[in-house]
Image (cartoon, rainbow, N blue to C red):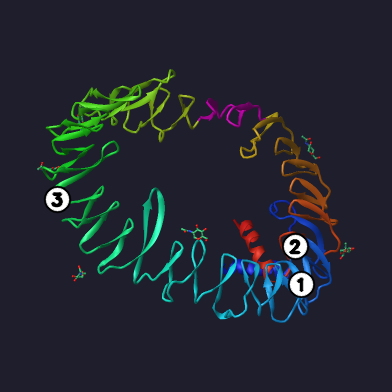
Amino acid sequence: MSLTLALLLSSLVVSEGFRYKGAGTVPQLVATAVYNSDSERCCKGTVHPGVNSIKECCGANVHDKSTQECCDGQVVEAKLGHLCCGKALYDTKTSICCRNKIVNVEKGLDFEHLSCCRGSAYDTTKQLCCPQATIDKKHEDHTHCCGNHTYNPKKSSCCSSNVNNVHVLTVLPFEGNKTTCCEGKLYDRGSEMCCLTKIVKYEGTGACCGDASYDTKSHLCCFAPSHGFKLVAKSGANDSCCLDKTYNTHTQACCNEKVIENANGRGQCCGTTLVDTEKQVCCLAAGSLKGVDKKTVNDSGCCGEVSLDFKKQVCCRNKDQKDVVVEKGTPKERMCCGVEAFDPSGGKLCCGGKKIDRITHYCCGSKEVAYANVDVACCGSELLFNPKKDACCSGDVLKGVKPRVFAAGAGSMCCGEAIFNGSSGEQCCDGKVYKMDPNEVCCRDKKYDQTKFVCCGRDVLPITANRSQCCFTTITDEGKDCKKKMLNYVLKRLE
Ligand SMILES: *[C@@H]1O[C@H](CO)[C@@H](O)[C@H](O)[C@H]1NC(C)=O
Ligand SMILES: *[C@@H]1O[C@H](CO)[C@@H](O)[C@H](O)[C@H]1NC(C)=O
Ligand SMILES: *[C@@H]1O[C@H](CO)[C@@H](O)[C@H](O)[C@H]1NC(C)=O
Ligand SMILES: *[C@@H]1O[C@H](CO)[C@@H](O)[C@H](O)[C@H]1NC(C)=O
Ligand SMILES: *[C@@H]1O[C@H](CO)[C@@H](O)[C@H](O)[C@H]1NC(C)=O
Ligand SMILES: *[C@@H]1O[C@H](CO)[C@@H](O)[C@H](O)[C@H]1NC(C)=O
C-alpha cells in the first residue's frame, strides 16, 4: 500500500468517517440502515446502540471482550483453555481443530506431534498424511508418500507404471546404480536410458526415437501419425524428414508430405506443387493454393488470382467484392479508397469510397458534408440534422442508447435517451431527468433531499442524526476488519 493511499484510507476511516454521498457510489455495497457513529455501532448491516470499548463487533452481532469470544461471527461465552474452531469453542486439552471441525483426541496421544489430515487428527511420528489417506509409516525414516505406501526417497524410488490401462504406483528399493524409474522398473542413468517405456543402452548422442535409442549423427527420427516413429539413415547434413522418408533440403522440397526435386533451390511449395519463385507467385484461389505467372519481375504478392507489385500497386475490392489491381500514383498511396489508390497521410479523407477534401469537408458515416453547410450536422454516424433547430444526443454504446435528434432550445442537454433543460433547475441522474430543489442531489438514478436522507450505495435511507452514516452489510465500523475491507473499495474508487 502506498503512503498516500494509507493516509487517504486512515483519514477516510478515522477522522471523518466514510460517507457515500451523491451519485457515482460503489455498486457492490448494500446498506440496510443508517447509524450515528458517535452513539451507535454498525456491525455488518446491524446497528447496535452504545459505543463502548469493551464491546466489539462480531459479524453482525456485538460481543463483550471481557467475557465472550467471537468465533467466525458467532458470539460464545469464553472458557479457560478453550479456543475457536469454526463457530464454536473447543477444549485444547482434549481435542484439536481440523478444518473448522472439532476432533476429539484419543487418550495417550501426544499433542505435540498431532496434526490434521483431511479433517482428522494423526500422529506425525507414526503416520504420514498421503493424498488419499492417512498411512502408517513402514519405517521411521519414511518421509514421502507413494500412493498408499510410505518410503524414503534416499533409499527407494516411487515408480509409476501402466498395468492394463490402470495407473499404478510402486515403491522400488535402489539396486546399486539403478535408482531412476522407467515404467515400473529401475535403470542406471549412467549407462542406460528410458525411451518411452523401454530401458535401452545409452547410444552415442542419447536421443530416443519412439522406444529405441539412436545416434543423431547417422540417423534421422521421422514421425508420421500413420506410421509412428521410424529411424532413417542420413545421407548428408542437409537431410530432413518428409513424412517417413528423407530429403535433401538443398536440392529437394517436401510439399504436402511428398518429395519434389528442386535442383536450382529456387522452388517453393505452393500446395502440392512447387513454384519457381523467379517466375511465379503462390496465390490462394478458390480455396486452394496455386502458382500464378508473374506479370513483371518485381511482382511478389497476389491480388485475387493475379500477381502484384507491392511497390507500385495496391489491391482494391470493387462493389462486386472482386479484387482489382490498381496502379499507385505516388509511393505513399498504400491504401484503397473505393477502387482508387489512396494516401491516408495526404490532404484527403476516404468517405464512402470517395476521396474528399479534409479541410473543407467531413465524413458523416459514408456521407460527405461541407463544413460550410451550417444547416446540417452529424449525429451518430448518419443522423443528419439542422443544428439551428435540433440537438443531437450522442448516445451510449455501452448502455445500448442510440444517437438521437431532438428539437433544441436554450439550455437543452442530453440525459440517456431523453433531453432536458439544464438551465431551468432540471438535472440528470444516471439517465433520468428530475426537477430538483436546492437541497436535492442524485443517488444513482434517484434524487433525494440531502438534509433528510443519505445515499447508501444504491439506496436512499432516512437520516437519524447529523452524523448519520451508511451501515453496510459487508463492513463493520471498527478495528482492522473495517479498514481492510474499506481498502478494496477505496482502491476501486481510485481506479
Ligand atoms: C488408498 O486408500 C484409500 C482409503 O483407504 C482408498 O480409497 C484408495 O483407493 C487407496 N488408493 C490406492 C492407490 O490403493
Ligand atoms: C555406478 O556408478 C559409478 C559412478 O558413475 C561407477 O563408478 C560404478 O562403476 C557404477 N557401478 C556399477 C555396478 O555399474
Ligand atoms: C547443405 O546446404 C548448404 C546451404 O543450405 C549448402 O551450402 C551445402 O553445400 C549443402 N550440403 C550438401 C552436402 O548438400
Ligand atoms: C524492379 O525493381 C528494381 C529495383 O527497385 C527496378 O530498378 C526495376 O526497374 C524494376 N523493374 C520493373 C520491370 O518494374
Ligand atoms: C430552459 O429554461 C430557461 C430558464 O427557465 C428558459 O429561459 C428556456 O427557454 C428553457 N429552454 C427550453 C428549450 O425550454
Ligand atoms: C442537524 O444539525 C442542525 C444544525 O446544527 C440542526 O438544526 C438539525 O436539527 C440537526 N438535524 C438532526 C436530524 O439532528
Tell me the residue that label 3 is attached to.
217
Q: Dividing the image into 4 quarters, which one contains the N terminus?
A: bottom right
- Does residue 338 belong to the magenta stretch? no
The local secondary structure at tag 2 comes to loop
Residue 76 badge: 1
Which residue: 40% across, 59% down? 169
As drawn, 380 above or below 487 = above
Measured from the top left, where is residue 444 in percent x and y? 74, 48
Find the distance from the CA under tag 3 to the CA under tag 1: 77 Å
Q: Give the secondary structure at mark 1.
A: strand
Relative to 415, is 158 above or below? Answer: below
Which image quarter holds the C terminus?
bottom right
Residue 111, percent across and down?
58, 79
Q: Can residue 467 be seen in this view?
A: no
Check disc 3 and report its element: helix, strand or loop.
Answer: loop
Whether residue 459 is visible, yes or no, is yes
Residue type for callout 2: Lys
Q: Identify the magenta region.
A: 360-387
Left or right of 220 in this view: 322: right
- Ligand 5 occupies quarter: top right
Residue 139 screen position, x and y as percent: 42, 74
Is residue 380 on the magenta stretch?
Answer: yes
Query: Where residue 44 is drawn, which disc sits there?
Result: 2
Residue 362 badge: none
Amino acid type, label 1: Val
Tell me which residue sits at (63%, 63%) in the image.
487
